[in-house]
Amino acid sequence: MTRLLVRDLAQLVTPSEAPPPLRGRPLRDVTVVEDAYVLCSDGVIEAVGRMRDLDPRSLGSLDEELDGRHLCAVPGLVDCHTHPAWGGDRVEEFSLRAGGASYEELHAAGGGILSTVRATRALDERGLRARVELHASWMLGDGTTTWEGKSGYGLDRDTELASLRAIRAAGGVPTWLGAHAVPPEFEDADAYLEFALSEVLPHAAQVADAADVFLERGAFDARQARRYLEACRSNGLSLRLHGDQFTESGAIPLAIELGARSVDHLEATGEGGARALATSDVVGVLLPASALFLDRPMPPARALVDAGAAIALATDFNPGSSFTTSLPLVCSLACTQLHLSPEEALSAVTVNAAHVLGLAHDRGRIAPGLRADLTIVAADDWRHLAYHLAGDVVAVVIQGGVRRR
Ligand code: NIG
Ligand code: FE
């Protein structure tokens, strides 16, 4: 048995125990324990409490002790929306956009996502795995202990499957984003979907947990998204959607009708969409780093939360629209741009993000019996996680009871 004691923490913070996904009051009701400890045993949290209630005689043998003075523990951060499987980069496009070119124009001209598809197809499986591992190491360094990763830059059978395997091998939760863009060898979206659903889905469903689609002008429309998602659901995959990024194209009603886990982006969502989402079980995943990176409007987060919607926050890490793996930065943006409180942001990057991945039963909070995933913040007040904009706020990362940073 391996046992680790994190002692003398300035604060320990954990979201509400209400059943996830949290919304309304439970979303902002976090518990803060001052002068705290966490005892981890074989990768699981054994006990949590105040130092004054810790009886040293009851501790038994310890393998490691961590001095938590001037540090705070929050649950290991969960990034429920990333695109980590790609080759090349988009720095040239970044420069063009800085000069005024728009993301959608570049995409329509065969750049954007399709330029990353060309670079990703050029990698062999070893090369792709090396890239995914590198990106996973960046996430861990930023305090992320659980992450979802999407394919979607292969768009042929072998590269899509290699992407999903690479994500699984690097410790991620794979999502098949088979409907990300229409690759150039197909005449149109319908012809591509015909291929993807007959040739790729049966294999992708063996590796992936979920399926995702880019429902947007210039990508896939609502009819095509429905066809793709229904086929994926029949093959046992959970459903996610990229929706309302640039235009309201029917993603929210479709997500609700099909019982999707989440609808992600929502920068273009209006009042009707916010109301519909709020009365459903679908989580709205907000990606403010992507809106910032593309200089797009921020999603109506405050309106969503005030209407009672369940929200999560994620990085959308990818080379084109959000080149960051930092959930602490996303929490800063949530507070400064989305007008969420640090408490709401914390619940959104922990328990609610875990719920989107179907993992809230064993992670997303700090409580006995849950996986010993802790992100230790380098400050006396845990809110520095969001307050210190782009700061070096992650002091220690514990994943499954093992110190990883
Ligand atoms: O979530 N919007 C579609 N897909 C990604 C961006 C992909 C890219 O630009 O390479 C996103 O923003
Ligand atoms: Fe995305």
Image (tube, grey):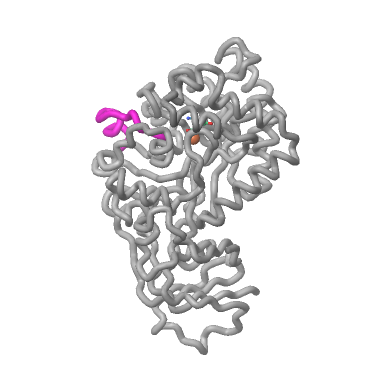
In the picture shown, does residue 216 fall above or below 350?
Answer: above
Residue 89 visible in the displayed image:
yes
- Residue at horizontal 45%, vertical 29%? 97
Question: Furthest residue to the front?
Answer: 99
Tell me which corner region of the image, top left, top right, bottom left or bottom right, holds residue 26. bottom left
Give the residue furthest to the top: 187
The residue under the point 44% across, 31% down is 98
Q: Position of residue 17 (x, y in %)?
A: 37, 59
Give, as a single range, the part of the protein colored magenta: 263-279
Task: Name the spot of residue 317 as percent of width and height, x first.
Answer: 51, 41
Q: Quadrant of the N terminus?
A: bottom right
Q: Quadrant of residue 83?
A: top right
Query: Is residue 278 a member of the stretch shown in magenta?
Result: yes
Residue shown at 36%/32% (left/top)?
296
Question: In this view of the protein, which residue sits in the foreground, 14 or 209?
Answer: 14
The answer to whether any part of residue 358 appears in the image is: no
Q: Position of residue 367 (x, y in %)?
A: 45, 66
Q: Quadrant of residue 101?
A: top left
The answer to whether 189 appears left or right of 287 in the picture is right
